[in-house]
Amino acid sequence: MKKTLTSTLLIAFLLLLYSQFTELAYKFGFAELKLVAVLENSEKMKVKCDAYSLGYFDEVKLQNKFQKCINDYEAQGYEIISRSDT
């Protein structure tokens, strides 16, 4: 019983510490960005454009690179069938 209570309190403390750490890290500019787009052409061939970064990064540069990938495939006749920005 005592071990269960101790482990429960330890887990609760670690979750609280983790949530505060991530909030503080995001305030100082540490972030995560994940962009995914799936495109399909008339022959049902699918391609994927994605961009992922964790840490300190230039969001505008990453967004531009992602959009360029999409634009290149759209110029070849592909259309976006799903897109996720997280």
Image: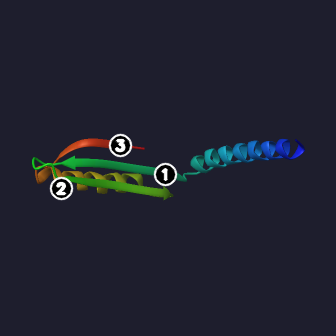
Q: Report if the CB atoms under discs 3 and 2 are less than 8 Å apart.
A: no
Question: Looking at this rendering, what residue extends furthest in the right direction?
Answer: 2
Q: Residues within 10 Å of mark 3 (few under 14, many from 20)?
A: few
Distance (Cα) linking label 3 and label 1: 14 Å
Q: Nearer the viewer, residue 42 or 78?
A: 42
Q: Mark 3 sits on what residue?
A: 84
Q: Position of residue 72 (x, y in %)?
A: 18, 55
Distance (Cα) linking label 3 and label 2: 18 Å
Helix, strand or loop at mark 1: strand
Q: Give amino acid for label 2.
A: Asp
Q: Nearer the viewer, residue 82 or 22?
A: 82
Please give the label number shown on residue 72: 2
Please give the label number shown on residue 32: 1
Specify which label sits upstream in the sequence, 3 or 2.
Answer: 2
Distance (Cα) linking label 1 and label 2: 25 Å
Residue at 24% x, 56% y: name it: 69
Residue at 72% x, 42% y: name it: 16
Residue at 49% x, 51% y: name it: 32
Specify which label sits upstream in the sequence, 3 or 1.
Answer: 1
Q: Report if the CB atoms under discs 1 and 2 are less than 8 Å apart.
A: no
Split into 4 quadrants, where in the image is the C terminus? top left
Helix, strand or loop at mark 3: strand
Q: Give amino acid for label 1.
A: Glu
Q: Give the tally of numbered discs.
A: 3
Q: Residues within 10 Å of mark 2 (few under 14, many from 20)?
A: few
Helix, strand or loop at mark 2: helix
- Left or right: where 62 falls relative to 31: left
Q: Nearer the viewer, mark 3 or mark 2?
A: 3
